[in-house]
Image: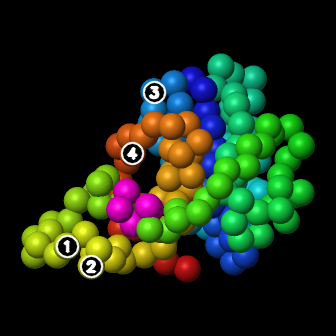
Amino acid sequence: MTRVIALDPGRSKCGLLLADIATNTVLQGMVIPSAEVLDQLRSWMVDAQGEDDQIAELVIGDGTSSTIWQHQLPASLKVRVVDETGTTLRARARYWQLWPARGWKRLLPLGLRIPSGDLDAIAALVILEHYLGRSLQWPGPDPLKNAPSR
């Protein structure tokens, strides 16, 4: 298993994603407060320590506060900075590909469909897919429907 982390950096919240690129599968995706990101990264790194599923690298978008984040990331992680221009719009379209609209909402044109929640985890997915040059599967539940209320 080859694991990669993607980070859509932000000031107050971040999109964070853990993927197995050998199987092109998202393992976990979440939107969490910025203050919790480093703890989550360390948790994933500890879980992978000493096993065949080591974290290969972290891919981070070059947008909001990216430089600040790059200085805070664990030194043991190989970091790749990726252009994140247009990820918000691409994340919206990608969301509807992964979790198609149901009922009357599917009748709306794609440009008028707005997911009900923060798309930061999907933006992290889009950043990683752009870096890899291929799409990933997200077999888990819709992160917007299962997001904890804060």
Q: Residue at x 19, y 73 (%)?
A: 109
Disc 3 to disc 1, C-alpha distance: 32 Å
Question: How far across and how far down the image is residue 16, in percent?
Answer: 60, 56
Magenta stretch: give its range. 90-94
Question: Image quarter for residue 38?
Answer: bottom right
Do the residues bearing badges 2 and 3 touch, measured as CB atoms within 8 Å? no
Determine the residue located farthest toward the top in the rendered image.
52
Q: Earlier in the sequence, mark 3 or mark 4?
A: 3
Residue pointed to by mark 1 = 109
**In terms of secondary structure, where does tag 2 sit?**
helix
Q: Residue at x 68, y 46 (%)?
A: 59
Question: How far across and how far down the image is residue 108, in percent?
Answer: 16, 75
Q: Earlier in the sequence, mark 3 or mark 1?
A: 3
Q: Earlier in the sequence, mark 4 or mark 2?
A: 2
Q: Nearer the viewer, mark 4 or mark 1?
A: 1
Residue pointed to by mark 4 = 138
Q: Quadrant of the N terminus?
A: top right
Residue pointed to by mark 3 = 23
Marking on residue 112 = 2
- Residue 44 left/right relative to 116: right
Do the residues bearing badges 2 and 1 touch, measured as CB atoms within 8 Å? yes
Looking at the image, how many numbered discs can be counted on the residues? 4
**What secondary structure predominates along the stretch shown in magenta?**
helix
Residue 33 visible in the snapshot: no
Marking on residue 131 = none
Q: Nearer the viewer, mark 4 or mark 2?
A: 2
**In terms of secondary structure, where does tag 3 sit?**
loop
Q: Quadrant of the C terminus?
A: bottom right
